[in-house]
């Protein structure tokens, strides 16, 4: 089925930076989070993320949203346009920093807030293309039984089972470019939008139609449109520069590999010739010494020395002297 009338919408990273921070637009974020986390999410507040400052390095590459839901849990939504070498390590640092910065000195550990980290990636983080959404958490399991560790705590007169994932950060990685536009569930509808900047008319997930309404490019003012188009151009240029740099690096690696092979072969031939000559000289000397021993033994026998004396002086055994036919014609 073809959808030729899909309306072009504002990119999610731009929307996250300039539009979705308005409380009246929280419903778009809530729809996306509900589809991903598979539970109803209500955003109470949106905090300013330190990494979302307007600087030349980050303004094209990364956008962060830090939200607080109705349970008091922190949800970090990060949109990353380009590859970062130690991305997972930075995620770990970011969640840890968020936890520690929101704990007052002397505050009991039970007040630690749960953190959910969501990364919307426009580059391939993993090597294989076998999935486009990854989930990670910290889990304790018995070494022998393999069963998960479950704690029981009393909260408001109710004994409640607590799993480690209820305490430790959870991570979601969405590799947008790996998505093949096949819709199987509500989340796929949102990823389709993230990838294609459009909404199909058959989409039904929560608040997805509000994206079509609120992120319509045609509703932007002339100034907003110009600013947005400059942003798209800069992102494209940045992407082109990075891709060109990548190609240049790959070419240098390939050139280095070829030169390395050629030098290796050349060195191997030289070393081979050198070793061959060395081995030949060694073998020649050894053969010459051996022949000399034989001649010496023969001369001794011709002078009438006993076989025993000849064997003792030359190092040959009696049987070796006999085997070498040194006694022949004597």
Image: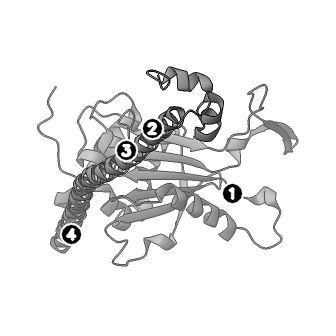
User: Is 34 on the left or on the right of 254, as rendered?
Assistant: right
- Mark 3 or 1: in front is 3
Q: 10 Å neighbourhood of mark 3: few (<14), some, or many (≥20)? A: few
Please name the residue shown 31% across and 63% down the image: 14
The reply to whether callout 1 and callout 4 are in contact (CB within 8 Å) is no
Per the image, label 3 sits on a secondary structure element best described as helix
The reply to whether callout 2 and callout 1 are in contact (CB within 8 Å) is no
Per the image, label 4 sits on a secondary structure element best described as helix
- Mark 2 or 3: in front is 2
Please name the residue shown 85% across and 42% down the image: 153
The reply to whether callout 2 and callout 3 are in contact (CB within 8 Å) is no
Hey, which residue is sitting farthest front in the picture?
304
Q: Residue 113 carries which label?
A: 1
The front one of 247 and 252 is 252
User: Is 316 on the left or on the right of 229, as rendered?
Assistant: right
In three-dimensional space, the C-alpha distance between marks 1 and 4, rounded to whole angstroms, equals: 37 Å
The reply to whether callout 3 and callout 1 are in contact (CB within 8 Å) is no
In three-dimensional space, the C-alpha distance between marks 4 and 2, rounded to whole angstroms, equals: 90 Å
Say if 207 sits above or below 242 in the image.
Answer: above
In three-dimensional space, the C-alpha distance between marks 3 and 1, rounded to whole angstroms, equals: 82 Å
Q: 10 Å neighbourhood of mark 4: few (<14), some, or many (≥20)? A: few
The front one of 127 and 70 is 127
Task: Read off the residue under disc 2.
Answer: 295
Q: Which sits earlier in the primary sequence, circle 4 or circle 2?
A: 4
Say if 78 sits above or below 192 in the image.
Answer: below
- Mark 3 or 4: in front is 3
Q: Which mark is residue 234?
A: 4
Q: Which sits earlier in the primary sequence, circle 3 or circle 4?
A: 4
Per the image, label 1 sits on a secondary structure element best described as loop
């Amino acid at each position: 089925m073809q959808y030729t009338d899909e309306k072009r919408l504002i990119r999610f990273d731009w929307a996250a930076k300039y539009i979705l921070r308005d409380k009246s637009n929280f419903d778009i974020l809530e729809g996306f989070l509900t589809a991903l986390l598979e539970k109803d999410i209500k955003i109470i507040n949106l905090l300013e993320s330190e990494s979302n400052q307007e600087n030349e390095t980050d303004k094209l590459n990364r956008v962060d949203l830090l939200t607080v839901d109705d349970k008091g849990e922190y949800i970090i939504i990060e949109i990353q346009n380009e590859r970062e070498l130690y991305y997972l390590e930075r995620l770990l640092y970011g969640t840890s920093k968020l936890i520690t910065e929101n704990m007052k000195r002397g505050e009991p550990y039970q007040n630690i807030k749960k953190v959910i980290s969501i990364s919307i990636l426009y580059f391939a983080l993993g090597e294989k293309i076998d999935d486009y959404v990854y989930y990670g958490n910290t889990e304790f399991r018995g070494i022998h039984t393999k069963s998960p560790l479950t704690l029981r705590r009393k909260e408001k007169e109710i004994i409640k089972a607590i799993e480690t994932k209820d305490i430790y950060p959870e991570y979601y990685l969405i590799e947008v470019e790996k998505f093949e536009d096949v819709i199987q569930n509500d989340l796929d509808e949102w990823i389709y939008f993230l990838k294609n900047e459009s909404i199909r008319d058959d989409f039904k997930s929560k608040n997805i139609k509000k994206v079509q309404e609120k992120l319509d490019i045609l509703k932007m003012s002339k100034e907003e449109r110009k600013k947005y188009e400059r942003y798209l151009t800069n992102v494209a240029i940045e992407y082109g520069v990075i891709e060109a740099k990548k190609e240049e690096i790959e070419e240098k690696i390939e050139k280095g590999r070829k030169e390395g092979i050629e030098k290796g072969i050349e060195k191997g031939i030289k070393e081979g010739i050198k070793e061959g000559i060395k081995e030949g000289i060694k073998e020649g000397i050894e053969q010459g010494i051996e022949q000399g021993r034989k001649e010496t033994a023969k001369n001794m026998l011709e002078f009438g020395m006993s076989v025993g004396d000849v064997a003792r002086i030359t190092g040959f055994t009696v049987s070796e002297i006999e085997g070498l036919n040194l006694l022949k014609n004597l």
